Image (cartoon, helix red, strand yellow):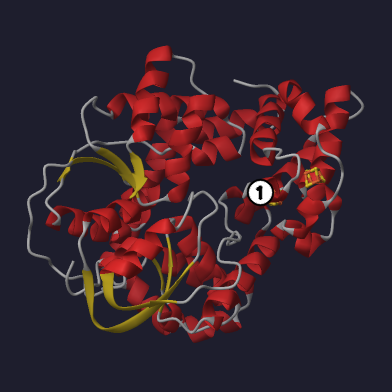
Amino acid sequence: MKKLIDYKEEIHKCSKCGLCQSVCPVYKITGNDCSVSRGKFIMLNGIIKGDLKLNKNVNKYLDMCLKCNACKDFCPSDIDARKIFLTAKSEYFQQAPEKKIISLFQSNFVFESVLNMVKITTNSYRFLKFDKLARKFYPIFLKMGNLGKKVILANEFVTVYRLPFTVYPKRLSPLTIVYFKGCVNNYINPKTKNATENVLSKMGVKILPINFKCCGVPFLSCGNVEQFQEQAVFNLAQIPEEFDFFLTDCASCQNAFKEYRDYIEDENLLKKLAKIQEKSMNVNEFIVKNIKNIEFSKQVSFTFHKPCHLENIDFIKEFLEKSKNVEYIEMKEFDKCCGLSGEFAIKNPALSEQISLTKAQNAKDTNADYILTSCPACVLGITQGLIANSMNLADYLPLNFIEFIALAEKI
Ligand code: SF4
Ligand code: SF4
């Protein structure tokens, strides 16, 4: 595993051209050089040289980053900012005063106990129909300012809209699937998992019953590398040698598996990981590739937000070629971060809301019937923007793409 000092040469490649400023969503709002790669590299270079300490102030600016890597795509020196910032974060975490308390909270026992309590609470909340009741009070919550908006956001996160998913005739397929569901499906809101299992089972593929743990992204983004490694080793050990595809409906979970290779040292696990990577695919891409045609009973339109960690959206083109009665309307800046990015939204709530507000406005401007994406955090980010814009959520329901596929009349 690399240390900050190992990135010395890469950091020196920064020519201070400032091009990253033109694409960084955080810099666009703050105008502060420390919130974009250029300024952060100056700070990190100072730390490597010993002129600066990796202290709370530097950490504050490391946290002021969506890890979206938009700056890398634009950087003439092709510097992988995300990797460098995550490494700096883990070095800060090693000596941070809050390390003990965070490590305790993120230990497997405590973390999973909390998630299980969340699961019981959200299930009971839905069972008692509190989500539906709360929706009736949205106009009042909106008048309550920030607190009211947070209540709406939390309610939207757990609510399961009863969409008319189609039950398709079963077909038989020889394919065996490992489906990594992720924590949102497992503990907070199973709607995407329901849609995925509905479509996959009707396609006749065999989903292997595997109990994974969290992919580890929340630990990695706060610098807790040891816990991230633990999650990686556990999750990889659960995957059998023989299967056809490794699927996930969350771009961040899929990317976490890709990142495991930088954090594990065991040669056998690395070999296994390489094989898994060859079979790894976003669930939407898999379904679009494996169905012949998709038919919606009436004309529908959608727009799509590309999550930062989703490699490409080529499957949309194929989806349109195979589908009937569907129109795609590209939103402005469809590939710019939605502003949520887990820890970023917790540490920088005002910035997060502002970024998601632009995203929601861009989506709304398309006038599409559905706003789609492929990551539960992005669904939440777009919802946050819609609430900040005081838009009627029922008119702009953001969904994972697979939930949209499950609405089709025939697949
Ligand atoms: S675009 Fe790259 S080289 Fe230019 S200032 Fe930003 S990080 Fe440095
Ligand atoms: S990763 Fe994203 S948020 Fe962070 S500095 Fe680069 S462009 Fe800005």
**Secondary structure under badge 1?**
helix
How far from the left and from the top, in percent, is residue 65? Answer: 69, 49
Q: Dot 1 surroundings within 10 Å: few (below 14), some, or many (20 or more)?
A: some
The image quadrant of residue 180 is: top left
Q: Is residue 158 visible?
A: no
Query: Is residue 105 rendered to the left or right of residue 351?
Result: left
At 53% from the left and 75% from the top, the residue drawn is 363
Q: Which residue corresponds to the image point at 43% horizontal and 35% vertical from the top-left?
A: 257
Q: Position of residue 239 (x, y in %)?
A: 28, 29
Which residue is more in the foreground, 89 or 346?
89
Left/right placement of residue 90 relative to residue 122 reads right
Quarter holding the N terminus is top right
Q: Residue furthest top?
A: 267
Instruction: Give above or below for 382 relative to 79.
Output: below
Q: Quadrant of residue 360?
A: bottom right
Residue closer to the observer: 84 or 136: 84
Q: Residue furthest front?
A: 321
Q: Which residue is mark 1?
A: 73
In this view, 218 is above or below 241: below
Name the one closer to the observer, 235 or 316.
316
**At 33% from the left edge and 65% from the top edge, which residue is drawn?**
319
Residue 159 image position (x, y, % from top left): 36, 68
Say if residue 22 shows up in the picture: yes
Q: Residue furthest right?
A: 51
Q: Amino acid at mark 1?
A: Asp
Which quadrant is home to the C terminus?
A: bottom left
* Residue 176 position (above or below residue 136): above
The answer to whether 313 is drawn above or below residue 50 in the figure is below
Residue at horizontal 58%, vertical 34%? 102
